[in-house]
Image (cartoon, rainbow, N blue to C red):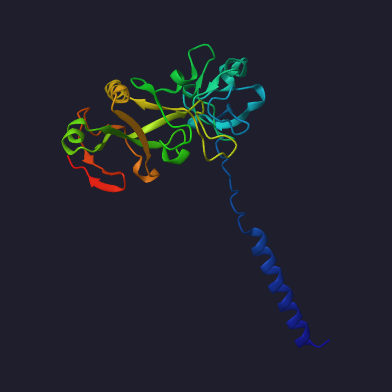
Amino acid sequence: MNKVQIAVLGATVVAFGGAYVLFNSAPAPAPQHVAEAPKLATDEVLVAAQDIPMGTAVGESSVSWQMWPKAAISELMIVKSSGPNAIDDVKGSLTRDAFIRGEPMRRDKLVKAGAGGFMSAILPSGLRAVAIKVDNAGDDYAGGFILPNDRVDVIKIYRDDGATKSRGVEVLGAQTILTNVKVLAIGQNVQEENGKKVVVGGNATLELDPQQAEQVILAERAGNANLHLVLRSLVDSAGPALTAGDQDSGGSGLTIVRFGAPQTATQ
């Protein structure tokens, strides 16, 4: 090996040695501290273990416990920490409204058996349940397609005695007396069952305020009048029931056909 090669090899060794010293003498990176996320406070909430229809008695198999964030728990929910007998406290209660699977059970949607009839349990404060007669074949209420929780208008069909006497033909009038009325039940049915789309019954129970209840009962009792229900579209069903007219005979006339001769009755 000549002097030039020795010099080159020496320079290479010195360079690698310097790099090694510099690398090992560099300060170590500061350790990174990972902050642990705060633990979410939870509690166990009683939820529906299956879909529970309205008016169903709650059993032990109907409900289960599910973890729930404490910040999202309302005072109406039933929590396990409230006591060891929380499930026993709700067993046998009737549901005032339907629950879907996984929905928290709420005290305001349950009523204990013996605390009154079911219909009185589902009635909001200040309102009344009034039953009116309807045709068993459904002719008086949209062919039987009106179901509980639908909204309807109540129309009075009456015989106009004055116009009938003066014209010599029977004259009928129609008057909408209430609009957007909630149907609580058709017959004994308070909800749609087993996918059944047509529910037929001998009466319809309506949700009314006290003044509307008087109006409907008076209209139904009138000897020359009868009541029909008219189904409203779902998009037109917002808001409370409204009084559309008084009990005085009024409204538009109808075309009456007698012995094949049509006659138009006007008021």
Tell whether 66 sits left or right of 175.
right
Along the horizontal axis of the image, is 238 left or right of 108?
left
| Depth order, front residue of 250/147 | 250
Q: Number of callouts in the render?
A: 0
Residue 72, position as x, y percentages in the image: 49, 32
Q: Nearer the viewer, residue 11 or 33?
A: 33
- The residue lying at 72 percent from left, 77 percent from top is 12
Give whichever of 7, 42 is nearer the camera. 42
Residue located at (54% from left, 27% from top): 105
Q: Is residue 85 above or below residue 74?
A: above
Looking at the rendering, which quadrant does residue 218 occupy?
A: top left
Answer with the quarter of the image where residue 248 lies: top left
State the residue in front, 236 or 261.
261
Identity of the residue drawn at 36% across and 34% down:
228
Task: Kindly identify the residue that appears in the image at 49 percent across and 27 percent down.
Answer: 187
Task: Answer left or right for 143 relative to 219.
Answer: right
Image quarter (top left, top right, bottom left or bottom right) of the C terminus:
top left
Residue found at the far right of this picture:
1
Q: Among all residues in the image, which is located at the extreme top?
A: 114
Q: Position of residue 141 (x, y in %)?
A: 41, 37
Q: Position of residue 260 (x, y in %)?
A: 31, 48
Image coordinates of residue 132 in percent, x first then y, are 39, 25
Eyeballing the image, is 20 above or below 62?
A: below
Q: Quadrant of the N terminus?
A: bottom right
